[in-house]
Image (cartoon, rainbow, N blue to C red):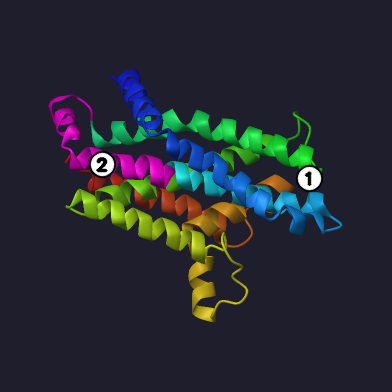
Amino acid sequence: MFFGMIKYHWLVLLREPINLFFGFGLPFLQLFLSFNQIREYEIVGQVMANAMPVFTIVAAMVLCFTDSGLSHAYTRQIKFLRRLRMTPVKPMHYIATGILSRIAVLIVFAATFIAFCATMFDMYVPAINNTIWPIFIGVLLLAFIMLYLIAMFLANLLNNAKASQGLIFVVFFTMLLLGGFMIGTGGFPDILQTVSNWLPSTFAITSLQAAWVGGDLFYGHYFWAMLGSIVVFALLSIKFFKYE
């Protein structure tokens, strides 16, 4: 049953290759568009050390929201998941295997993107035996789990599956906009800066940046808020899980 669900999630992922292309391509597109601007900095490597975690979280968000979340809402809409009710598969099994099936994709992207940044922008990459790596990978996986659980919660929150797809898009682009992915948050009104500071994407980015540069992971509320979000959305995604 466990490996069968892993296979199912892989088939869902490969059924919509455009999501993979979009998830992998968007960070590279952002780099391409800002290439000349980044090159103007005298400390390009340091700039990229801060920017690389941001682009990695963007890819994780695409993988979680536009792949996992939208796909689940779609399978609800066509009544496909109704079949799972007659099997031993429980909501927690479905969610856990969904996370596991996509971790390899995320790790491959992160490794590719880090190698690209190191080659093109002279970004410093720690030695393979550096203690930064297990911390960085651990934080990246926690961030991915949090984003996946949020996407699954949104995909199941509304009774109307099609409306759930719209909700996912709204939250996804709100996090991109207010999270500073598209424009800087420095010019935002105070209330929007406060909202931005408490977005799950901000928890993920700030924690991953601290892990990558060897900073204080526990400074501020970001890492603890990410752990709390994982617990809360794990419970909510299981509670609101719908087969149709």
Q: Which residue is mark 2?
A: 74
- SS assignment at label 2: helix
- Mark 1 or mark 2, which has the lower sequence index? 2
Residue 13, given in percent of the width and then of the height, sits at 39, 31
Q: Which residue is pictured at 63% across the width and 73% down the height?
A: 186
Q: Which residue is pictured at 71% across the width and 37% down the height?
A: 116
Measure how far apart labels 1 and 2 are at the Cα level.
Answer: 40 Å
Residue 184, given in percent of the width and then of the height, sits at 61, 68
Residue 231, given in percent of the width and then of the height, sits at 39, 48
Q: Which residue is pictured at 57% across the width and 59% down the height?
A: 181
Up/down of 106 relative to 3, above or below:
below
Q: Is residue 67 magenta?
A: yes
Q: Identify residue type, mark 2.
A: Tyr
Q: Is residue 20 magenta?
A: no
Task: List the single residue furthest toward the right.
Answer: 42
- Pick whichever, 85 or 189, lies toward us: 189
**Quadrant location, the C terminus:** top left
Please tell me in which quadrant of the rendered image residue 167 appears. Answer: bottom left
Residue 152, given in percent of the width and then of the height, sits at 33, 45
